[in-house]
Amino acid sequence: MGSTSAENNGTGSTGNHGTGDDGTTGVGRRALIKRSAALGLVSVPAMSFLSACASGGGGDDSGENEGKASESNPFGVKEGSKLDVVIFKGGYGDDYAKAWEAAFKKKWGVTSVHTGTQEITGKLQPRFNAGNPPDIVDDSGAQQIPIDVLHKNGQLLDLAEVLDAPSVDDPGTKVRDTLVPGTLDAGLQEGKVVALNYIYTVWGLWYSGKLFAEKGWEAPRTWDDFLAVCKDAKAQGIGGLAHQGKYPYYINVAIMDLIAKKGGLDAMKAIDNLDPKAFVGSDAATEAIEAVYEVVEKGYLMPGTNGLTHTESQTRWNQYKAAFVTSGSWLENEQLKTTPADFDMKFLPMPLLPDSALPFEAIRAGSGEPFLIPSKARNLPAAKEFMRMMLSKEWSTVFAKEANSLTILKDGVDPDVRLRPGTQSTLEASKAAGDHTFRFLYTEWYSEMGTAIENASNELMAKRIQPKEWLKRAQTAVDEQAKDPSSKKNRRD
């Protein structure tokens, strides 16, 4: 958003969604995404944070927030205590969290101190440094504090106790067994789940059903068909692809999806596992980056797109100034205020390069919008219970209603909840994909490497470097990361 991510900008995702730089969006997300999101914006403060955290103090509550644990109160929530909640107020807004907090107070008698903000690093870095963090944090947006930085400094709670607790809906089942398979992976650091990426996110291309119907265009299944639509769009004075130039996270959605679909899961894992041939020497990476660069060379980018933020670019797309845009599924929420009522937003899996290993229906899918419990939170019992209740059908449905998005809870949304067109199309795409889903983890594991690859993509899209140089820079980022001994603790099989 978000995750991961500027995924969530101003939104997303990261995300999620994923995250906002300009505050122009209303309800909704992310990062997922990424996300993982515009990490280039936080690389410098992240480094100062890295050094500052080591000297932080401690927040000892001396048991003042500890109640009596029981079967119905597994963490010992204390009635009358207070919970400090910070929510990234991006594409998903924060109304859902306010509803959660009201429900939490009604059930447990715990009053929440609520902060909704896009300034995650600005507001929270001093608190983490001083050893006085909030109790639970939605760490997303362009100013997200990188998860790997927090983890390396011992600032995050291992969430195993929450995940192994009994589910609110079925006490005979552990919380972790109620979740969509694979969705915990994005929160892994050195084998421990330290972030709960809450929103089920898909990444890919988006288009307007109305515009495509008016122009007689069919949703492309191959990259050649994609380029053909872009060519026709250009001939009619419309951009082919709206690139969120100031946030190269987004164009990496296209680049990385093409690599994974062309080369299969092995090509994806080679990047996450810091393979010496992850980019240079990879046929899949070479074909993918050349394919994306063809959009630049042939003038199919929406004019001016390289200088725009994600929301500026997406708003022009909403105005039918481009045929396609890349994003995660927080996009619809992020653009609520600028999307025409009859726009008919649609999601599209990344079209295929020739002889691709994965089918067209394959999509990048997983979890975005990371929620954290700081290790020095003052009210750990309430924070753990709050997260456990997030993974109940009641709270999952609240989120779907307020934020128009799906969570990582299996069958976690009441069937009566009506989703908007774009979100509904992601649900249909997920069903069509079946087991053909994939998800990169390097964005969560290695924020500096992710930033370096994004910077290379920014240069490529501005035509300042060629594909060969992009591959070289991306591989250098991988090789540099591989020198870090702690990298060996992260591995995909």
Image (cartoon, grey):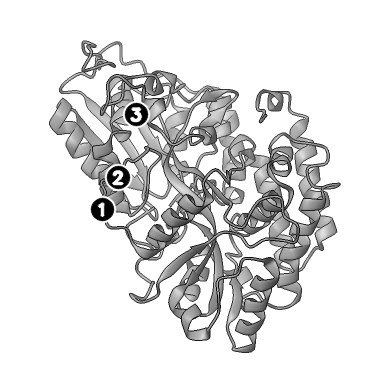
**Residue 13 can be seen, yes or no:** no
Of callouts 1 and 3, the N-terminal one: 3
- Packing grade of label 1 (10 A; few <14, some 14-19, many >=20) is few
Q: Are marks 1 and 2 in contact (CB under 8 Å)?
A: yes
The dot on residue 68 is none
The dot on residue 135 is 3
Is 319 positioned to the left or the right of 79 in the image? right
Looking at the picture, how far across and down is residue 259, in whole percent?
A: 71, 52
Of callouts 3 and 2, the N-terminal one: 3
Query: Residue beneath label 1, please?
Result: 417
User: Mark 1: which amino acid?
Assistant: Val
- Packing grade of label 3 (10 A; few <14, some 14-19, many >=20) is many
**Residue 264 can be seen, yes or no:** yes
Which residue is most to the bottom?
236
Looking at the picture, how far across and down is residue 405, in whole percent?
A: 36, 51
Q: Mark 2 falls on what kind of element?
A: loop
49 w.r.t. 153: above or below = below
219 w.r.t. 32: above or below = below
Report the residue at 78% width, 63% height from top: 290
The dot on residue 413 is 2
Q: CA distance from mark 1 to mark 3?
A: 30 Å
Q: CA distance from mark 3 to mark 2?
A: 26 Å
450 w.r.t. 137: above or below = below
Is 374 positioned to the left or the right of 384 in the image? right
Looking at the picture, how far across and down is residue 237, in whole percent?
A: 59, 87
Looking at the picture, how far across and down is residue 164, in whole percent?
A: 39, 19
In the image, which is nearer the foreground, mark 1 or mark 3?
A: 1
In the image, which is nearer the foreground, mark 3 or mark 2?
A: 2
